[in-house]
Image (cartoon, rainbow, N blue to C red):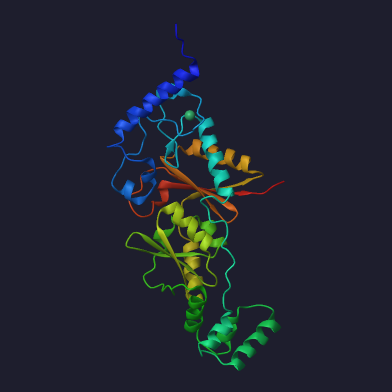
Amino acid sequence: MLVLNRRTSASLLRRSAASVQSALSSFQPEHDAAVGYDGVAAGIDFRPGFFGTCANADCHSGWLHLWRSRSVPVFEGGWTCSPECTAARLRGAVSRELDGRGAMAREGHRHRIPLGLLMLEQGWITQIQLRRALVAQRAAGSGRLGEWLVQQHAVDETKVTRALGVQWSCPVIPLEGADAGSLTTAMPRLFVDAFSALPVRLAAGKMLYLGFAESLDPVLAHAVGRMTGLRVECGVVRSSLFRPAHTTMLNAKFPSVELIEATSATAAAHSLARSVERSHPIASRLVRVHDCLWLRMWLRPQHGPLPETQSVEDVVCSIVPL
Ligand SMILES: [Zn+2]
């Protein structure tokens, strides 16, 4: 008599559950779409339902998980049946991000024309004005060249901002009509503060303008784009306008954030999986931002280009080896 061993029967049952799910897929959404605006804005229910298959490729629970009553958590488009399977999925995602797959670890070196030289070439300042500003900057040992040029009345701040835009090949972003308070779910407060970034406005519900006063941070912009599904355009903001707007933003209400320090990638994955198991998100995703890992968890469906403050939780994890 043919006896199926447990593994074989489990795998068959899993395959049969998968085939039922595939039959249903014509009218069930892909879970990945749930995170993005288009999917959730359409009011999609992205619970995997009774026939959901555990997203952990090495799941050993087999058909048993069909009887488990959980439909969350969902991480990167896949439901996991147990804390062990969630941990396995997070280990994979942490390793992907730390290897630089998917993440933009750092921008390659790009030569940029020095600001003073650029302004000289544009005919905005004279050699004497440039030399005087450089001498003052060197003597003081602080301050940016643009600030010294403005202080010495060689040029006004608008020109310095324009020059920064040319230097970075990016637009100058005006702050008129900016509503920082409505953009606090674009990224954790920690990033706004640490990377001196200012989410300025959303255009057509698809493009997020991210302002900087001095130098751009394409790594942060790339990570925010991956997390939110928005196209992120960087630009420079006039320095005197940037500072008060930045302070206002830092005082606005952000989603709750948990800060984690881990001593290894394994420990980071373990802590992040614990957060996912604790919050039971209906969607979650991990991206790397410089040396941090940013986990975002959606607790409720998102109905706009950005989630509401109360509907998401962030976890920022840094790995500090002992
Ligand atoms: Zn599983």
Decide which of 121, 2 is in the foreground and name it.
Answer: 2
Measured from the top left, where is residue 3 in percent x and y?
46, 10
Measured from the top left, where is residue 99 in percent x and y?
59, 49
Image-quadrant location for residue 95: top right
Image-quadrant location for residue 18: top left
Decide which of 163, 135 is in the foreground and name it.
Answer: 163
Residue drawn where x is 51% and y is 25% of the image: 60
Vertical placement of residue 174 versus 44, above or below: below
How many marks are shown on the rendered structure?
A: 0
Decide which of 11, 251 is in the foreground and name it.
Answer: 11
In this orientation, does residue 240 appear?
no
Residue drawn where x is 33% and y is 53% of the image: 304
Q: Quadrant of the N terminus?
A: top left
Measured from the top left, where is residue 26 in percent x and y?
28, 37
Measured from the top left, where is residue 163 in percent x and y?
50, 80
Q: Is residue 250 left or right of residue 50?
A: right
Vertical placement of residue 36 versus 232, above or below: above
Residue drawn where x is 41% and y is 51% of the image: 309
Vertical placement of residue 203 versus 254, above or below: below
Q: Is residue 221 left or right of residue 49?
A: right
Residue drawn where x is 35% and y is 39% of the image: 46
Decide which of 129, 304 is in the foreground and name it.
Answer: 129
